[in-house]
Structure formats: C-alpha cells, structure tokens
C-alpha cells in the first residue's frame, strides 16, 4: 500500500496545479487511516481495493479543490463526505454495496460543487447527522425539494412565531438586512460587517425557515443590500402587538409563505410561519 500511496501522490503532483501536500498528508493520516482500520474485517483484498479507490478519489478531490483543509474555516459537502461520512458509514454497508456507494458518493459530491452556497450549507448541516449511506441520494433530494420549492401553505392573517438566536453561530453577529434565497431560506447580513474585509467574506448567516428553523451558518454572500423601506407585513405588525420581544424593527422582509424581521437591539431573528 505504501508504494501505491507514493505513486498516487507523485501522479497527483504532476497533474494538479492546486495540489496541497499538507492536506494530502492530513487526509491520509486521518480519514484514510480510519477507513483502512474499519475495512480490516472480512475480505482483506476487497477491503484494500476499496481503500485504494477511496484514496484515489480523495487525491482527485484535493487536486480539483473540492476538499478543504480545516484552516479554510468553511466546509462543503465533498469535505464532509470524504472526511467523515465515507470513513464512518461506508464500512456499515454490506460488502457488495460498498463500491457502488463510494462511486455514488463521488458523483453526488462532485455535482454539488456547482450548487448554490446555501444548498451546500444545508446539506452539510443536515448531512453531518446521517447514520447510513443507504438511499442517500433520495434523502438529500427530499431535503432539496423541501428547501427550494414553495411551501404548500401561504402566510395568512394568523401565524406562528419562531425566534432564532443568531449568536449561536457567531457571538458578534448583529442581524441587519435580510433577503430570501429561496421561498423558505433567508440570508441575514451583519449590519456592522456587511462588506468583505481583510480577505474574509462579509458576515452572513443562512436560516432554513421550517417549523423548527435550521441555522445554516455563513453563506459567503457578498451581495450589497439596500436598507429596507417597505412597511412590515400584517403578520409582523400583529406579532409586535402581542409579543413584548417584537418591534423596533431594523429590517423586515416577507413573501407569500414567510415573514422575517431583525431588530435594532437584538441578535434574534423573528420568523413568522403559517399556523
């Protein structure tokens, strides 16, 4: 195996301008070792062949820039898959299912590289808790449909409020302007760090507006937003009348299905959902 790894690295160095030797070493010593140890039981030859395929695809991912180092401070689905999901869950499948599952994971991870950043964040956040690779595509497809398609119920005269603490993700975050990325997904911009500086993205957070809202973390969004000038929706006005936490809006935004608002003196995001 050591000769295979050496040859694989030499080939990758020659093929890829973006080759990262430090990331390759970390990949071998971390997830590579974990998967190798988990595949030791049963058919040793089949396990070694599967490990070789995993390392070959991992090298390809590093060379193409799909696999991020920890120092990048961000994650995509490919990094989650090759660093955690595959080493942890692939050995749990039946032997005859493992190689096809690895190939499907590569195709899925590569296809997601062209997805919008918020879709990557959604899949990373929800994918981290996966317990099986069985029907992974169906599971993620269902998530994508729910996030991208308009909800079945519109926001009427009555609504349910949810309060989302954005300081859970970033203790400094002061919610400012908001815009919708999808019918039930919003991007919230920090009012004090709304523009990129020092090589860093502007401070933003995504929220999936489901019954129990899901924080998606930084969105990498550098869109410049104008201050909100419209009147709050009827649902937000009603919320301010019945909830002492509401009001003193900084920015409000709504569509047919959801309404959201940030406040001048709060790190919470007010979310209104259909009852």
Image (cartoon, grey):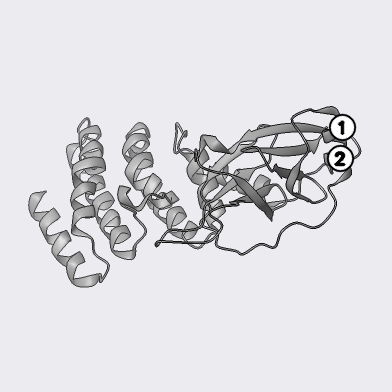
Viewer-closest of 5 and 265: 265
Examine the rendering and report whether any part of residue 201 can be seen: yes
Residue closer to the observer: 163 or 26: 163
Q: Secondary structure at mark 1?
A: helix
Q: CA distance from mark 2 to mark 1?
A: 7 Å
- The foreground one among 51 and 115 is 115
Which of the numbered marks, if any, corresponds to residue 201?
none
**Image x and y of residue 108, in percent:** 46, 53
Residue in view at x 9 percent, y 50 percent = 2
Residue at 40% x, 52% y is 78
Q: Which residue in the protein does label 1 denote?
A: 241
Q: Nearer the viewer, residue 72 or 237?
A: 237
What residue is drawn where x is 87% and y is 32%? 241
Image-based side of 225 in relation to 258, left or right: left
Q: Position of residue 106 (x, y in %)?
A: 39, 54
Q: Are marks 2 and 1 in contact (CB under 8 Å)?
A: yes
Residue bearing mark 2:
237
Measuring from the top left, give residue 244's x and y in whole percent.
78, 28
Q: Residue furthest right?
A: 157
Left or right side of 259 for 85:
left
| Residue 35 as seen in the image, left or right of residue 253 | left
Whether residue 44 sits left or right of residue 189 in the image: it is left
Number of other residues with Cα within 10 Å of mark 2, as a class: few under 14, some 14 to 19, many 20 or more: few
Badge 2 marks a residue whose secondary structure is helix
Is residue 137 shown to the viewer in this render? Answer: no
């Amino acid at each position: 195996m050591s000769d295979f790894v050496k040859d694989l690295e030499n080939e990758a160095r020659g093929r890829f301008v973006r080759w990262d030797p430090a990331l390759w070493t970390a990949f071998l010593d971390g997830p590579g070792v974990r998967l190798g140890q988990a595949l030791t039981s049963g058919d040793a030859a089949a396990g070694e062949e599967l490990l070789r395929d995993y390392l070959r695809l991992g090298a390809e991912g590093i060379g193409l820039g799909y696999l991020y180092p920890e120092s990048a401070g961000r994650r995509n689905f490919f990094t989650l898959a090759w660093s955690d999901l595959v080493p942890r869950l692939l050995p749990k499948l039946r032997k005859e299912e493992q190689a096809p599952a690895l190939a499907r994971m590569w195709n899925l991870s590569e296809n997601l590289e062209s997805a919008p950043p918020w879709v990557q964040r959604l899949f990373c956040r929800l994918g981290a808790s996966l317990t099986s690779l069985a029907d992974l595509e169906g599971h993620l497809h269902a998530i994508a449909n729910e996030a991208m398609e308009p909800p079945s119920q519109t926001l009427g005269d009555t609504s349910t409020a949810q309060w989302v603490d954005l300081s859970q993700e970033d203790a400094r975050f002061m919610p400012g302007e908001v815009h919708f990325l999808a019918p039930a997904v919003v991007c919230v911009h920090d009012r004090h760090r709304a523009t990129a500086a020092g090589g860093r993205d502007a401070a933003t957070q995504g929220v999936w507006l489901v019954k129990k809202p899901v924080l998606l973390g930084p969105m990498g969004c550098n869109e410049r937003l104008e201050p909100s000038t419209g009147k709050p929706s009827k649902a937000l006005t009603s919320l301010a009348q019945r909830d002492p936490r509401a009001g003193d809006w900084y920015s409000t935004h709504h569509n047919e299905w959801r309404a959201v608002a940030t406040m001048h003196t709060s790190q919470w995001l007010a979310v209104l959902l259909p009852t």
